[in-house]
Image (cartoon, rainbow, N blue to C red):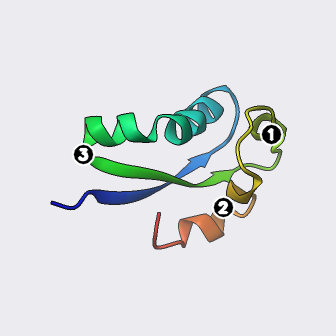
Amino acid sequence: MSTKKIGVAVIGCGIVGGATAKLLVNDKELLKTRTGMELELKYIVDVNFSRAQELGLESSLYQSDLDKVLNDPEI
């Protein structure tokens, strides 16, 4: 049986959003085991990425255009 893959966008990278993004990146396999789904962080949406940078999250995830994210069919 194949695992369902779900694209996730975190809106805001403050305390809660940053922790959520780190969890999605660092505990990918644990989340897959517990949920039966592969949760893939596709975007971190914010206007200031200093917190995301502090957390070591990849800059390829950064997006400031919320409309682009909301219109992405993979999310």
Q: Residue at x 55, y 65 (%)?
A: 70
Bin the neighbour count of mark 1 within 10 Å (Cα to Cα): few under 14, some 14-19, many 20 and up. Answer: some
Q: Nearer the viewer, mark 2 or mark 1?
A: 1
Disc 2 target residue? 66
Which one is in front, 52 or 64? 52
Disc 1 target residue? 53
Percent coordinates x, y for residue 8 in the rendering: 49, 53
Disc 3 target residue? 36
* Secondary structure state at the residue bearing disc 1: helix
Identify which amino acid the numbered label 3 is placed on: Gly
Percent coordinates x, y for residue 42 in the rendering: 56, 58
Bin the neighbour count of mark 3 within 10 Å (Cα to Cα): few under 14, some 14-19, many 20 and up. Answer: some
Q: Is residue 24 above or below residue 15?
A: below
Percent coordinates x, y for residue 62 in the rendering: 73, 55
Q: Is residue 64 left or right of residue 27?
A: right
Dividing the picture into quarters, in which one does residue 68 lie?
bottom right
Real-space Cα distance between discs 3 and 2? 28 Å
Q: Is residue 23 left or right of residue 62?
A: left
Dividing the picture into quarters, in which one does residue 54 lie?
top right
Q: Are marks 1 and 3 in contact (CB under 8 Å)?
A: no
